[in-house]
Image (cartoon, rainbow, N blue to C red):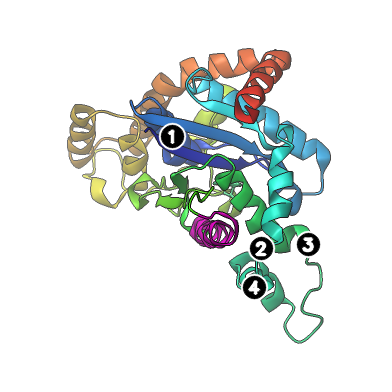
Amino acid sequence: MSLRVLTGITTTGTPHLGNFVGAIRPAIEASRRPGVESFLFLADYHALVKCDEPARVERSRLELAATWLACGLDPERVTFYRQSDIPEIPELTWLLTCVTPKGLMNRAHAYKAATDANAGGEIDNGVTMGLYCYPILMAADILMFNAHQVPVGKDQVQHIEMARDIAQRFNHMFGGDRPPFVLPEAVVEEDTALLPGLDGRKMSKSYDNTIPLFEGGAKALTHAIARIVTDSRLPGEPKDPDGSHLVTLFDAFADAGERAAFREDLRAGLAWGEAKQRLNAAIEREIGPLRQRYDELMAHPQRIEDLLQAGAGKARA
Ligand code: TRP
């Protein structure tokens, strides 16, 4: 039996270079391994919990789909779909809701963070039932396809544990000797896959330190790279490659020989300006051809829609 790997992407933003290195590139590589059956979907129902701007969710869905396809996701190999095209997901959500103890949801980090912020006042202020039941919808996403493994960031591990709890309960109550649900396991992305942003902290939209993946084209990429923070050593002065996040960024797009040469040249006094040009060239070498495919797809949204419809057909079957 093949290993089923499933993950969802909330459709609220535009992917950046950190998403590419940390999630998109490894997931696409993993999907090509023999014996793996990949499910990847746009979690647009989850997006509604975080975002009440329909236009933004719609835009993000399109950009995310185009990004994954441009980066090499093969819709023949991967079951690639939009959550809201699968009516069985909300249907299963209700069945699971009816076996989920309310106390379990009280312990969810996102809900607790919201109620902690309301301490002293009405604790459920601003909390929707969508936020409260978010983990049950996520459990349905996963259990629906009997996924074995769910690659996620650390912040999502609790949700996978809740999906396990809910599955176990359902199996126990209704499964008899043929329990319907596989108990899923979280696979946490390693810290080495975390790309630093312009300022050296983890690349993240909330720190405003991101490098765009495709948005704005080659120009925006160069512009962002120019803003990477370095120390003030002058051209010709030896530089310490190990303390530099510019080097970490370079590593993510270079082979072993290039990495060694880059370090050696920095120790020998390579100017930061020139180092940025080399970084730019290394990223562009990999991203440039993908950007062309991305622009092509964004110019033909109907192609994306057709692929998503075909994916929904496969997923529903
Ligand atoms: N909640 C996840 C996140 O914010 C996205 C998501 C929704 C998901 N459903 C999922 C991830 C199912 C894995 C499996 O990142």
Residue for badge 4: 112
Residue 26 at x, y = what percent?
A: 39, 35
How many badges with numbers are in the image?
4
Residue for badge 2: 99
* Residue 296 lies in the magenta-colored region: no
Q: Nearer the viewer, mark 2 or mark 4?
A: 2
CB atoms of marks 4 and 1 within 8 Å: no
Image quarter for residue 118? Answer: bottom right
Residue in view at x 43 percent, y 41 percent: 22
Q: Is 134 in front, or is 294?
A: 134
Q: Nearer the viewer, mark 2 or mark 1?
A: 2
CB atoms of marks 3 and 1 within 8 Å: no
Upstream in sequence: badge 4 or badge 3: 4
Residue for badge 1: 27
Residue in view at x 55 percent, y 14 percent: 292
Upstream in sequence: badge 2 or badge 1: 1
Q: Is 217 in front, or is 104?
A: 104
Image quarter for residue 127? Answer: bottom right
Q: Give, as a three-letter code, the residue at label 4.
A: Lys
Q: Is mark 4 within 8 Å of ligand 1?
A: no
Q: Distance between the residues labelled 2 and 4?
A: 21 Å
Magenta segment boundaries in residue numbering: 156-176
Q: In this view, does 301 lie to the left or right of 183?
A: right
Residue 296 at x, y = what percent?
A: 62, 12
Residue for badge 3: 129
* Residue 162 lies in the magenta-colored region: yes
Q: Nearer the viewer, mark 3 or mark 1?
A: 3
Upstream in sequence: badge 4 or badge 1: 1
Q: Give, as a three-letter code, the residue at label 1.
A: Ala
Upstream in sequence: badge 2 or badge 4: 2
Q: Is 156 in front, or is 301?
A: 156
